[in-house]
Image (cartoon, helix red, strand yellow):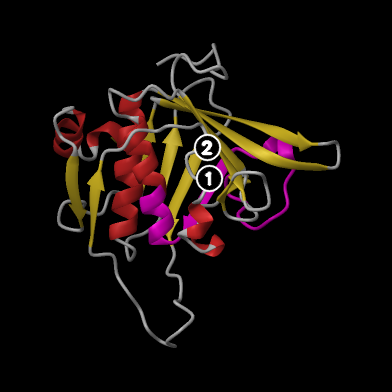
Amino acid sequence: MIRLNELFPKIAATLGDESTRRFTFNQSALSPVPSEVESNDLGLIKSLHYYNDCFRTDRLTFFAKKEAYQDLALLFLSVAFNPEAPPVSMHLRNRVSEIRQIAISCVRIESGVVEGYEKRPLRFEYVAREIESRHPWECVLSRMPSHQLPSFELTQSGKDGQSCSWEDRDSIQCRFGDEGHVLFAELLLNMSRQRNQTTEIDLESVGRRWPALGAFSAEVRLCLPGAPSWHHGIEF
């Protein structure tokens, strides 16, 4: 099984050069990836976040070094630019990770204006930007409808759409449109820059104080080594 860091080594090397501030992504640069990928460089811990003892939501905390976040960004971009390709299942091999699989697929979202009209992603002109807040998508709803935002569903492997106990949930379903894929990938790329000093990012669902994810999505926290919430049992 191919490893995450083996998918696009040439692009990763180019982006890893701090002098590279811009890069054009398109389908020719990002070929479809195999349906099964594995990584030992990424760990995820699940937890519950309570709001005033009256509401709770799932929280998924990612732990990785910058290089792994960059590789993950390239995977999401590949899925976005190849929507006809089969869904990708990424298997997490880190021994501390409570999440063992991430299923990633891109769904076509109707424009809602012209019936029967379809559009395809053409290119993404990435420009490196500084991350200035742990809530970098504070105003994302002014730029993107809520149904197009990234969404992360905590479930159990092999039981998609079936009920299962929270303790047994060990898989994440990432099933959203191409714009959500590119938005999330852009954030991961910015986080992976050598100059980035923000070690922890929080993404909350619609309806929370800083809405950044779909209405029914689990919350997402992205951590780099040295972050306040870094899990000290995670080793890479």
In the image, which residues are magenta? 157-183
Residue extending furthest top?
232
Q: Which residue is rendered at x = 68% and y = 56% of the image?
A: 162
Residue denoted by label 1: 138
Residue topped by disc 2: 135
Residue drawn where x is 46% and y is 84% of the image: 113
Q: Position of residue 94 (x, y in %)?
A: 46, 23
Q: Residue furthest bottom?
A: 115
Residue 231 found in image quarter = top right
Q: Position of residue 223 (x, y in %)?
A: 48, 25
Kindly identify the amino acid type of the residue bearing the numbered disc 1. Answer: Glu
Relative image position of residue 150 (x, y in whole percent): 50, 52
Taking the spot 66% from the left edge, 44% from the top edge, the residue there is 209
* Image quadrant in which the C terminus is located: top left
Q: Secondary structure at mark 1?
A: loop
Pointer 1 with pointer 2, Cβ within 8 A: yes
Q: Rate crowding at label 1 as few (under 14), some (14 to 19) or many (20 or more) other CA atoms within 10 Å.
A: some
Is 39 left or right of 202, judged from the image as shown?
A: left
One can see residue 1 in this view: no
**Which residue is pictured at 39% across the width and 33% down the height?**
131
* Residue 111, percent from left and from top: 44, 77
Can you say which quadrant of the picture contains the N terminus?
Answer: top left
